[in-house]
Every structure is written in structure tokens, then in C-alpha cells.
Amino acid sequence: MELDQLKNTWNKYAGTDVSKHRLDESELRRMLKRKANGLIDRINRNVRIGFVVIAALVLFFVIDDLFITPNMAGDVAVPVWIYLIDWLNTLFLLGTFLYFWLQYKRVKSEYSQSNDMHRVLSSSVKLLLTYRRLFYWSLSVLLLAIAVSVVAGFFANPNLGSEVLFSEHNQAVVLRSFAILLGVLALIFLIFHWGFRRLYGRYIAQLEETLAELEEID
């Protein structure tokens, strides 16, 4: 039975038979503890999934920098700063998740050792909210790096001089190319946004709800 249902049951019988239908504070706390345990377990599972996803992305970026981009460039010299941006983006992405992983392990350790559920839940919510901000910063950096790399590669093509590129005949092609780039970037953003909400977003709301319920009985 959910916490709200139990509260309603308690309110129903409070005026008639208190001694028989009493739902004391300790029982409510035990229920909230079980609810929080379930949320933490699911978040823990999703953190491992997130680690696999991040590791796969980092591996893809490394393979792209070492093999895919040089092969696709052919005779076109890829500027060193493009590789630098890619590597900095990869390190920022990896560093963001490692920071979250270490902080999450600390909060999880506190949760297993502490009986102060309010403090642990507050720490968990704050950590996930911080990670959400870091995640969207990392996503913004990733999209910016992709955009800069594509545009730089576009203009670095020796077969496309500025006169040819911006000629009236090619303006429609250039505009379509940039429209496709924006569409791809928007799609990447939506996929990552959906993935984050799926893995973590809904649990932030549920942890906040559990924390609010705990504060009601304090």
C-alpha cells in the first residue's frame, strides 16, 4: 500500500479507534526507507548503464580521431586545433561522469552507514541536480565541438574556395548543408535529453517527493 493510501486510512480511523489503527512515525519512516532503497537501487543500476554509454562514446571519439577522420580527410590537412578540441571535449565528458561517479559512491556509502535519511536524501537530490547541470554543459560542449569540426572541415576543402562556396549557384546547397547540420545537432540533443530523463530525471522527482514526505512527519 502506498504512503498516501496509508495516510488516508489513518485519517479515516483517527477519530474512531486510535489505539487499533494507529500508524506511528516509526512505521512511516520504515516505509520511506524501503521506498528510498528501491529508488537508490534503480539509480545505481542506471549509473552503471550511464558508465557503459560514456565509455562507448569516449571509445568512439578516440577511434574517430585516430582512424575515421584521417581516412575521410584524404589529402585535406586537418588542423591540429580540431583534434585538440575533440580531445578536450572527450576529457571534459569523461571527467564530468567520473566526478559524478565518485560523488555518488560517497553519497551511497553515507546512505549505507547513516540513519539520518533526511541528510542522505538531500545529498542525493543535490548531487543529481548538480550532475544534471554538468550533463547539459557537457552536451553543449559536445554539440559545439561537432559543429565547429564540421564547419571547419567544410571550409578546409581545397575544392571549395570562398568564391565557389558563396557563389549564387551554391548558396542553396550551403544553406541546405547548414540546415542538415542543425537538424543533426537537434536530434543528438533530443536523444541525449531523452536518455538522461530516462536514466535519472524521473528519479530526481521521486527522491524529492520522498524527501518532502519525510519532512511531513518530522
Image: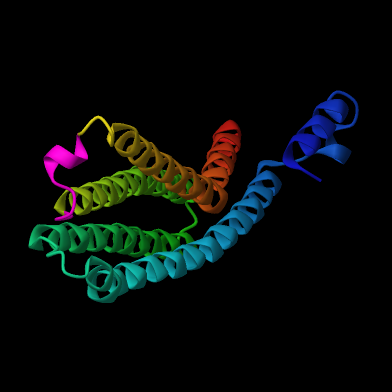
Report the side of 75 relative to 47 (left or right).
Answer: left
In the picture, residue 81 is in which quadrant? bottom left
Residue 53 location, quadrant: bottom left
Residue toward you, 183 or 111: 183
Q: Position of residue 120 (x, y in %)?
A: 45, 51
92 or 68: which is nearer to us? Answer: 68
Task: Examine the image and state in which quarter residue 89 appears.
Answer: bottom left
Question: Please, is residue 133 above or below residue 93 in the view?
Answer: above
* Residue 167 covered by magenta stretch: no
Residue 95 on image: x %, y %: 26, 61
Q: Is residue 199 left or right of residue 2?
A: left
Q: Nearer the viewer, residue 154 or 197?
A: 154
- Which residue is drawn at the image coordinates 51% and 66% (left, top)? 49
State how the image is colored: rainbow
Indicate the position of residue 197 as horizontal and vertical percent values. Answer: 53, 45
Which residue shows up at 70% across the image and 48% down it?
Answer: 27
Q: Which residues are magenta?
A: 157-166
Residue, x 85% and y 23% (percent of image)? 15
Q: Is residue 152 above or below residue 111?
A: above
Identify the residue at the far top of this view: 15
User: If the image is split into quadrants, where does the C terminus sit?
Assistant: top right
> Which sits in the foreground, 129 or 13?
129
Q: Main secondary structure of the magenta part?
A: loop
Question: Residue 156: x, y in percent?
Answer: 15, 53
Residue 128 relative to residue 15: left or right: left
Is 159 covered by the magenta stretch? yes
Residue at figure coordinates x 31%, y 64% from the top left: 98
- Check the image and name the residue furthest to the front: 169
Q: How many marks?
A: 0
